[in-house]
């Protein structure tokens, strides 16, 4: 409940800041503008972008990374993941899906392919 109260205050402000930055990039003639927003789907900001690209990993790997990065217990890490959207929910709302378990070269190829397809579709 406290988290929702906080996000109800913060997320609209962040959305306005992001929209302003996109307008500035457009005014500068930028062809592509990337919003790196971990909560883009949770916040409902899909209308701010043309495509949603999502990076996913299996739950066990996510737990391992959270424990290593944040020093949480495995139980606390699992609780954190349960409060977030599932990989399936993210994939269902995404046009491009990447997996950070892949080798960096494979991810680069995937990103390049996605950008190439975007250019072909938009003329």
Image (cartoon, rainbow, N blue to C red):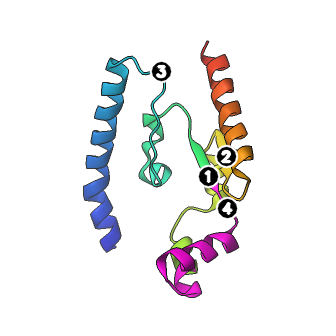
Q: Which mark is residue 85?
A: none
Q: Mark 2 or mark 1, which is nearer the start of the sequence?
A: 1
User: Are circles 1 and 2 on residues that touch, CB within 8 Å?
Assistant: yes
Q: With respect to residue 91, does 114 lie above or below?
A: above
- Crowding near the residue tagged with mark 1, few <14, some 14–19, many ≥20 C-alpha atoms within 10 Å: some
Find the residue positioned furthest to the front. 105
Q: Residue at x 36, y 26 (%)?
A: 25
On screen, residue 84 versus residue 44, left or right, reads: right
Look at the image and tell me in which quarter the C terminus lies.
top right
Q: Residue at x 71, y 31 (%)?
A: 113
Span colored in magenta: 55-77
Q: Earlier in the sequence, mark 3 or mark 4?
A: 3
Residue drawn 67% across the image and 71% down it: 61
Contact (CB < 8 A) between labels 1 and 4?
yes
Q: Quadrant of residue 16?
A: top left
Residue 99 among those drawn in magenta = no
Identify the residue position indicated by label 2 in the image: 97
- For residue 33, above or below residue 84: above
Gap in angstroms between the C-alphas marked 1 and 4: 7 Å
**Residue 57: mark:** 4
Residue that carries the numbered disc 3 in the rendered image:
31
* Disc 3: CA contacts within 10 A as few (<14), some (14-19) or many (>=20): few
Give the CA separation, mark 1 to mark 2. Answer: 6 Å
Q: Secondary structure at mark 1?
A: strand
In this rendering, the count of numbered labels is: 4
Q: Is residue 29 above or below residue 16?
A: above
Q: Which mark is residue 55?
A: 1
Circle 2 or circle 3, nearest the eye: 3
On whether residue 64 falls in the magenta region, the answer is: yes
C-alpha distance separating marks 4 and 2: 10 Å
Q: Is residue 103 above or below residue 61?
A: above
């Amino acid at each position: 409940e406290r988290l929702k109260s906080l996000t109800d205050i913060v997320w609209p402000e962040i959305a306005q800041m992001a929209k302003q930055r996109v307008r500035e990039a457009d005014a500068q003639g930028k062809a592509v503008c990337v919003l790196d927003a971990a909560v883009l789907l949770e916040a409902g900001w899909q209308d701010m972008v043309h495509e949603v690209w999502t990076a996913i990993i299996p739950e066990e790997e996510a737990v391992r990374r959270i424990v290593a990065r944040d020093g949480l217990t495995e139980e606390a890490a699992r609780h954190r993941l349960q409060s977030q959207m599932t990989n399936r929910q993210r994939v269902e709302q995404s046009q491009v899906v990447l997996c950070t378990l892949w080798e960096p070269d494979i991810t680069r190829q995937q990103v390049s392919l996605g950008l190439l397809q975007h250019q072909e579709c938009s003329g």
